[in-house]
Image (tube, grey):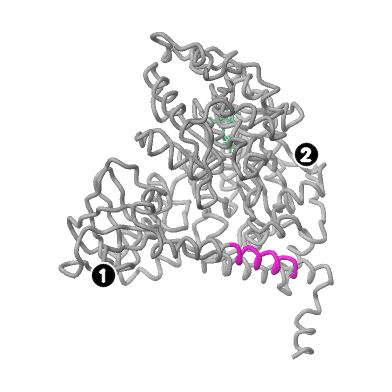
């Protein structure tokens, strides 16, 4: 056995074995953390009263069946009427456990549709005359992507060209070959696309590097700098020269945003979107395998699947999907483009890199990094993405996009000074000078309390405002530690709701406002109080890559808490929070508490607009 193992590993150096051993240790540590978390959550189904679970946003109750039908895939679709006074915490695709008062766990279900008064689930059994209403649905947390992540390490160990390439880049840290800009010959079809796309100089440079790379390119794109735009143009250019492209990203929304732009320029026949259909945006669904095979007869079905899978030139999916898809075991691409590369854990990127000898990493290492729960694994380096590792190893090879088209100059200046050594600039004058009162649809009406005048002002000089809740003197503004480790701040939630209402009264549409906070429990809290589904309340993490005209950030944590506010101490998360608003950012929180956190102290010192809610 020993001889066999030694033979199988003869192509590996000690540093390769160390790399794999480290990752096995780190992934196992993550697995342990995840098991502890899901076991506690799932045991709540038996141990916690329903009302409490509803309050915590993990359960919806009082459901009455109103109809059953069969789906195309022979699953039972059950519709329930629901009380619409609360916001449904579930979205299509979530796995839930269906129960009633007598029977816990009648069936596993998948949420199919949610509206104000009906929730529809798919399930493998019928309820007819077998169980009594009312029913309830609990979120069920299933592990996990971790076994696949471990399996991905095999790509790195392979005794072939692909394995050798991965080992050279990721452990040998072989630098990318320099693209000689003076000698590249740009085909006329590509020139036309570049001219039509009206890219700025930095974007053009990045595009040329990506088109002519012989191995890999790292494109650092600061917030709002046109990464999505650039990737869409890059794919158009590659297709124009008959190249086959794999597009992968960390999140479904990043994949779909790029495809949304691309489909305006490229026929959807040339794009195959892989992944579970419940997570794919409606406008992208025509690009899925299911949609492409809709009109195929059953005799031709198998051949049609093979044809679509083998010949569609652009394939797109999340990084998580790649190791699960048979297609990638027999198809190689001319180039693989990975968006949000700074968020991907290295073992997740291995099977993606294995699909092509050329890759383009696009992302921003000053925004969110891969999520690693185990403190030990994080400390030892598991949270460093491939993009960050290569960027640190080869700083001269980075191509940067620093002109941004999202934030006005006041907002851009904050993040630019705090995180980018003044490199983040406005792409044009219109972006730089944009403010609420310039658009003509926002006017502050009625009497405005003095402490809200800056927060509601549409003037550009008031683009960023810190509204101090003075929690030291106002008991109702202090946060509460929730049992599950989260944080809630009811006082702040009320202030946020008031601000949203006032912005809407003065002309802003609900979908133009985003409410963010780093605490999931505070998200649920504010959602319940707001009762406005058009106005999106979400965590800072889920806002990465997104923007709104107005952002209201509830800090939630105050220094009476027994917790150390780790989420707020993370500079990269603060950077994401500060770079989501186009025209207005209102930070609601206790100034004294915030200033005990180094990165928020710097932020508070930098802005001139502070108002205090009177005691
Ligand atoms: N060269 C350009 N000239 C003018 N506007 C541009 C240019 N490039 C991009 N934009 C605009 O800037 C906005 C942001 O672009 P995009 O969504 O591509 O940025 P991003 O870098 O992907 O953002 P994020 O940081 O959220 O990932 C879009 O409205 C886009 O149309």
Indicate which label's residue lies in the foreground, 1 or 2.
Answer: 1
The residue shown at (25%, 65%) is: 76
- State which region is magenta: 21-33
Q: Any mark on residue 125, and which?
A: 1
The residue shown at (52%, 32%) is: 547
Crowd tier of the residue under label 2, counting other residues whose Cα lies within 10 Å: few below 14, some 14–19, many 20 or above: few
Where residue 231 appears, as percent x and y from the top left, is: 59, 42
Instruction: Inspect the magenta stretch and tell me whether residue 141 lies in it.
Output: no
Ligand 1, seen in the image, is in the quarter at top right
The outermost residue toward the left is: 129
Image-quadrant location for residue 428: top right
457 is higher (above) or lower (below) than 149? above
Q: Any mark on residue 59, and which?
A: none
The residue shown at (80%, 50%) is: 177
138 with respect to 466 (left or right) = left
The residue shown at (62%, 30%) is: 199
Image-quadrant location for residue 244: bottom right
6 with respect to 493 (left or right) = right
Callout 2 secondary element: helix
Q: Earlier in the sequence, mark 1 or mark 2?
A: 1
280 is higher (above) or lower (below) than 195? below
148 with respect to 181 (left or right) = left
Residue in the foreground of this view, choosing between 143 and 478 = 478
In which quadrant will I find the N terminus?
A: bottom right
Where residue 79 appears, as percent x and y from the top left, is: 23, 55
Where residue 187 appears, as percent x and y from the top left, is: 65, 41
Q: Which residue is mark 2?
A: 181
Crowd tier of the residue under label 1, counting other residues whose Cα lies within 10 Å: few below 14, some 14–19, many 20 or above: some
On the question of residue 476 being in view, the answer is: yes
Residue in the foreground of this view, choosing between 112 and 607 = 607
């Amino acid at each position: 056995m020993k001889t066999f193992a030694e033979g199988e590993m003869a192509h590996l150096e000690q540093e390769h074995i160390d790399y794999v051993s480290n990752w096995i240790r780190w992934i196992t540590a993550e697995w342990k953390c995840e098991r502890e978390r899901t076991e506690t959550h799932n045991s709540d189904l038996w141990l916690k009263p329903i009302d409490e679970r509803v309050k915590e946003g993990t359960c919806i109750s009082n459901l009455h069946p109103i109809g059953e039908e069969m789906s195309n895939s022979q699953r039972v679709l059950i519709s329930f009427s629901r009380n619409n006074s609360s916001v449904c915490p579930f979205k299509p695709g979530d796995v839930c456990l269906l129960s009633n008062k007598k029977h816990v766990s009648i069936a596993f279900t998948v949420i199919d549709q949610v509206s104000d008064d009906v929730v529809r689930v798919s399930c493998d059994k019928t309820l007819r005359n077998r169980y009594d209403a009312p029913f309830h649905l609990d979120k069920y947390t299933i592990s996990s992507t971790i076994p696949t992540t471990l399996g991905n390490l095999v790509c790195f160990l392979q005794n072939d060209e692909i394995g050798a390439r991965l080992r050279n880049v990721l452990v040998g840290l072989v630098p990318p070959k320099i693209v000689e800009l003076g000698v590249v010959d740009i085909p006329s079809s590509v020139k036309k696309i570049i001219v039509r796309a009206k890219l700025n100089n930095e974007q053009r440079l990045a595009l040329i590097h990506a088109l002519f790379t012989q191995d890999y390119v790292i494109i650092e794109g600061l917030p709002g700098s046109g990464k999505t735009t650039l990737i869409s143009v890059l794919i158009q250019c590659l297709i124009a020269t008959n190249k086959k492209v794999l597009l992968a990203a960390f999140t479904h929304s990043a994949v779909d945003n790029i495809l949304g732009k691309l489909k305006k320029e490229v026929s959807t026949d040339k794009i195959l979107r892989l992944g579970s259909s419940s997570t794919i945006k409606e406008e992208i669904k025509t690009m899925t395998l299911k949609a492409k095979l809709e009109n195929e007869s059953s005799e031709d079905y198998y051949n049609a699947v093979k044809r679509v899978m083998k010949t569609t030139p652009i394939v797109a999916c999340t990084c998580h999907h790649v190791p699960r898809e048979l297609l990638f075991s027999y198809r190689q691409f001319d180039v693989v483009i990975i968006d949000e590369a700074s968020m991907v854990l290295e073992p997740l990127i291995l099977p993606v890199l294995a699909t092509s000898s050329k890759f383009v990493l696009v992302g921003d290492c000053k925004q969110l990094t891969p999520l690693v729960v185990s403190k030990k694994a994080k400390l030892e380096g598991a949270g460093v993405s491939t993009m960050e590792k290569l960027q640190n190893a080869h700083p001269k090879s980075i191509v940067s996009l620093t002109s941004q088209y999202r934030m006005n100059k006041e907002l851009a200046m904050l993040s630019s000074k705090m995180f980018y050594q003044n490199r983040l600039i406005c792409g044009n004058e219109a972006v730089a000078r944009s403010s609420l009162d310039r658009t003509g649809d926002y006017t502050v009406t009625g009497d405005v309390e003095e402490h809200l005048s800056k927060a509601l002002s549409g003037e550009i000089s008031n683009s960023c405002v810190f509204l101090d809740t003075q929690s030291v003197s106002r008991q109702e503004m202090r946060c509460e530690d929730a049992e599950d480790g989260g944080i809630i701040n009811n006082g702040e939630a009320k202030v946020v709701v008031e601000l949203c209402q006032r912005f809407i009264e003065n002309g802003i549409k609900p979908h133009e406002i985003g409410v963010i906070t780093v605490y999931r429990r505070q998200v649920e809290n504010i959602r319940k109080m707001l009762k406005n589904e058009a106005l999106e309340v979400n965590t800072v993490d889920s806002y990465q890559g997104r923007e709104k005209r107005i952002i209201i950030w509830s800090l939630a944590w105050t220094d009476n808490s027994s917790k150390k506010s780790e989420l707020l101490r993370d500079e990269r998360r603060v950077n994401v929070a500060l770079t989501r608003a186009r025209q207005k950012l209102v930070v609601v929180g206790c100034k004294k508490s915030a200033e005990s956190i180094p990165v928020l102290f710097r932020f508070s010192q930098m802005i001139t607009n502070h108002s205090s809610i009177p005691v």
